[in-house]
């Protein structure tokens, strides 16, 4: 009976630890797939298409990559309550290799920053884009929203150039599997 009690005690302790930070844990769980798809989308776009934009009012694909980088640094530093690293301000015209490296570095920073995030700080004030104080919870919500929005935008730019975004490539590969069996 003692081993069962010990297992129950350890399981309860692990569950209680997880339950302390459900919001932070969700972002940590989301990060690998969001990083993989976003980085994959940027890698998929040919270098000569980084100046592409669907309409004159929209940003170029290169600017989108720079914007993703900046957003990751802003939101992840605020979520994790860690200083934002000093990085070169990107314009979106630097070329695919440099922008790709910057996006990857920003997701690496997010991994480090999110490891320090705790839900106990959700109500702490941070300084928002407009210079006004906001609850840190805004950064948590905005980070998840930013990842979804920017991947969706990158996916649309790829499709408008006849390319499949990473999430569709997997679906397309799975579609072909039944045909291979015939």
Image: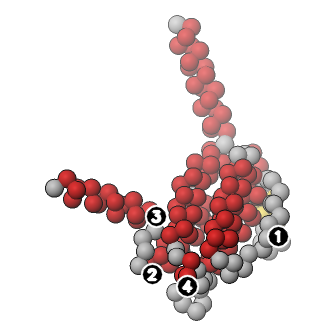
Q: CA distance from mark 3 to mark 4?
A: 19 Å
Q: Are marks 4 and 1 in contact (CB under 8 Å)?
A: no
Q: 120 and 83: which one is in front?
A: 83
The numbered dot on residue 52 is 4
Q: CA distance from mark 3 to mark 1?
A: 37 Å
Q: Earlier in the sequence, mark 4 or mark 1?
A: 4
Between the C-alphas of marks 2 and 3, the distance is 14 Å
Disc 2 secondary structure class: helix
CB atoms of marks 3 and 1 within 8 Å: no
Where, by quadrant of the figure, is residue 145 drawn? bottom right
List the residue tagged with mark 2.
160
Q: Measured along the vertical axis of the image, is residue 118 above or below residue 48? A: above
Q: Which residue is mark 1?
A: 132
First along the sequence among labels 3 and 1: 1
Determine which residue is flagged by label 3. Answer: 166
Q: Quadrant of the C terminus?
A: bottom left
Position in image of residue 121 (x %, y %):
77, 49
Disc 1 crowd rating (10 Å Cα; few below 14, some 14-19, many 20+) is few
Query: Which sits in the foreground, 78 or 161?
Result: 161
Above or below, 116 against 13 in this view is below
| Residue 122 visible in the picture | no
Q: Is residue 154 visible?
A: yes
Question: Looking at the image, which residue sits at the far left?
Answer: 182
> Badges 3 and 4: C-beta atoms under 8 Å apart?
no
Circle 4 SS class: loop
Q: Say which mark, if any, is on residue 161.
A: none
Q: Is residue 34 left or right of residue 103?
A: left
Asked if the residue at tag 4 contacts the one at tag 2, i.e. Cβ–Cβ closer than 8 Å, the answer is yes
């Amino acid at each position: 009976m003692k081993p069962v009690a010990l297992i129950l005690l350890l399981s309860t302790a692990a569950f209680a630890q997880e339950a302390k930070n459900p919001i932070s844990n969700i972002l940590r769980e989301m990060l690998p797939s969001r990083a993989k798809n976003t980085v994959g989308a940027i890698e998929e776009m040919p270098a000569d298409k980084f100046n592409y934009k669907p309409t004159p009012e929209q940003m170029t694909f290169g600017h989108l990559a720079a914007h993703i980088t900046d957003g990751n640094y802003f939101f992840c530093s605020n979520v994790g309550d860690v200083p934002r690293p000093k990085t070169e301000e990107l314009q979106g015209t630097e070329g695919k290799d440099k922008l790709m490296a910057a996006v990857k570095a920003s997701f690496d920073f997010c991994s480090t920053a999110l490891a320090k995030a705790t839900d106990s700080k959700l109500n702490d004030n941070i300084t928002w884009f407009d210079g006004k104080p906001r609850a840190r919870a805004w950064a948590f919500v905005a980070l998840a929203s930013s990842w979804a929005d920017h991947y969706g935008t990158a996916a649309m730019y790829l499709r408008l150039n006849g390319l499949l975004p990473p999430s569709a490539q997997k679906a397309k590969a799975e579609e072909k599997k039944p045909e291979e069996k015939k």
